[in-house]
Each structure stands twice: as C-alpha cells, then as structure tokens.
Amino acid sequence: MTLTWAAVTGVLAGVTAARVALPRVPEFAEPPLTPALAYAIVPGPAVLVAAAALAACLVAAAATAEPLLRGVRVERLRESSA
C-alpha cells in the first residue's frame, strides 16, 4: 500500500512539475543548425514498463513482509517489561 501510494504520488508530482517548469526554460541559447529530435513517447510500452515496475515493487514488499510476519508470535507480543 505504501509503495503504491509513493509510486503514484511521485509520478504525478514529477509530471506536474515538468509541465509547469519546462515551458519556461529555454531549450537553446541560439537556434540549432540540425533538425529537432522527436521525443514522442508511445503510451503503450511506457504504461507496461510502469506497471511491471510497480508489480516488482509489490512482489518485493510481499516477499519481505512474509518472513517478518512469520517470526511474530502472540506470546511475544503479550510479554511486557512494565
């Protein structure tokens, strides 16, 4: 849950910041002599890569949480030094 929220929030914050800041930053001091490069992003592969990265994060979180939760015993939780 935490990784998903962080991933979504980070992507949205980055896209918002880029849309706000990039139009105000000049790309070149002088016009280039070569033709401009095309930076078109194809949405299909980009979404697939983002989904695969998110799935990998969730699998890693589940794999980490499983051994930690197996080590917790109710008797140990009830023990108190107070």
Image (tube, grey):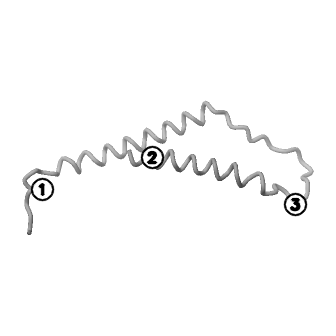
Residue in view at x 54 percent, y 33 percent: 48
Counting labels gives 3
Task: Please tell me which of labels 3 and 1 falls first in the chain.
Answer: 3
Q: Is residue 45 above or below residue 20?
A: above
Q: Nearer the viewer, residue 13 or 64?
A: 13
Identify the mark at residue 5; answer none if there is no mark: 2
Q: CA distance from mark 3 to mark 1?
A: 65 Å
Query: SS for tag 3?
Result: loop
Q: Amino acid at mark 3?
A: Ala
Q: CA distance from mark 2 to mark 3?
A: 39 Å
Query: SS for tag 2?
Result: helix
Q: Is residue 74 above or below residue 59?
A: below
Q: Amino acid at mark 2?
A: Trp
Query: SS for tag 1?
Result: helix
Q: Residue furthest bottom?
A: 82
Query: Relative to residue 46, is residue 61 drawn left or right?
Result: left
Residue 23 location, x and y as percent? 77, 51
Mark 3, residue position: 29
Residue contact at pointers 3 and 1, CB within 8 angstroms: no
Mark 1, residue position: 77
Task: Please tell me which of labels 1 and 2 falls first in the chain.
Answer: 2
Residue in view at x 74 percent, y 53 percent: 22
Task: Please tell me which of labels 2 and 3 falls first in the chain.
Answer: 2
Q: Is residue 52 above or below residue 74?
A: above
Q: CA distance from mark 1 to mark 2?
A: 29 Å
Residue in view at x 16 percent, y 51 percent: 72
Residue 3 location, x and y as percent? 42, 47
* Of the two numbered discs 2 and 3 in the rendering, the one whose residue sits closer to the viewer: 2
Q: Which quarter of the rendered picture does the C terminus lie within?
A: bottom left
